[in-house]
Amino acid sequence: MKRLLKLFLIFTFLMVGICNTSQAFCGSKYRIILFYADWNVYSTKAINTMQKVSDISNGKFTLKKINIDDQASSFDIQHLGLRPKYSIPCYYVIDRNDRILYETKFYDQKPEDILKEIKTALDN
């Protein structure tokens, strides 16, 4: 009986640990998908700015950068079913189910303003 109780307790602790770990790795509620190109002069600014947006969002947004000229990125593009509608750089905000919630061309704005713009769009 004691052995069975020990096994049950070990199993319970393992399951609690796994659940907590998986919650930690679930990631953010939303993802920002940024399309960029190395040859585009605005892309470096877009990458830096959107990384700051992700950083100041307190874990609500994570940034995924997709280089449109990189063969390795073609899998991500096909998986997400996204194609840049706008000139490069542009970005999409998608939820965990890969639904597009917001999309726009990147304009040279402060990260705080971009975050406010995204939050306003998501609230509507």
Image: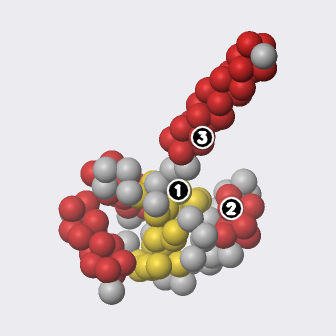
Q: Which mark is residue 76?
A: 2
Q: Earlier along the polypeptide chain: callout 2 or callout 3?
A: 3
Q: Is residue 83 visible?
A: yes
Horizontally, residue 35 falls left or right of residue 124, namely right
- Quadrant in the rendering for residue 15: top right
**Where, quadrant-wise, is the C terminus in this rendering?**
bottom left
- Indicate the secondary structure of the residue bearing disc 1: strand
Q: Position of residue 107 (x, y in %)?
A: 31, 73
Return the residue nearer the eye: 40 or 17: 17
Judging by the rendered image, the residue that carries numbered circle 3 is 19
Return the residue nearer the eye: 61 or 33: 61
Please determine whether, in this image, residue 3 is positioned above or below residue 99.
above
Please determine whether, in this image, residue 22 is positioned above or below residue 71.
above
**For the residue marked with disc 1, what is the amino acid?**
Lys
Instruction: Using the numbered discs, state the Cα–Cα distance from disc 2 to disc 3 in whole angstroms.
Output: 27 Å
**Residue found at x 36% / y 78%:** 122
**Residue found at x 54% / y 84%:** 85
**For the residue marked with disc 3, what is the amino acid?**
Cys
Q: Earlier along the polypeptide chain: callout 3 or callout 1?
A: 3
Contact (Cβ within 8 Å) of mark 2 with mark 3: no
Return the residue nearer the eye: 17 or 100: 17
Contact (Cβ within 8 Å) of mark 2 with mark 1: yes
Q: Position of residue 121 (x, y in %)?
A: 33, 81
Return the residue nearer the eye: 82 or 15: 15
Estimate how packed mark 3 is, as few (under 14), some (14 to 19) or many (20 or more) residues with alpha carbons within 10 Å: few
Please determine whether, in this image, residue 52 is positioned above or below residue 116.
above
**Residue found at x 68% / y 62%:** 76
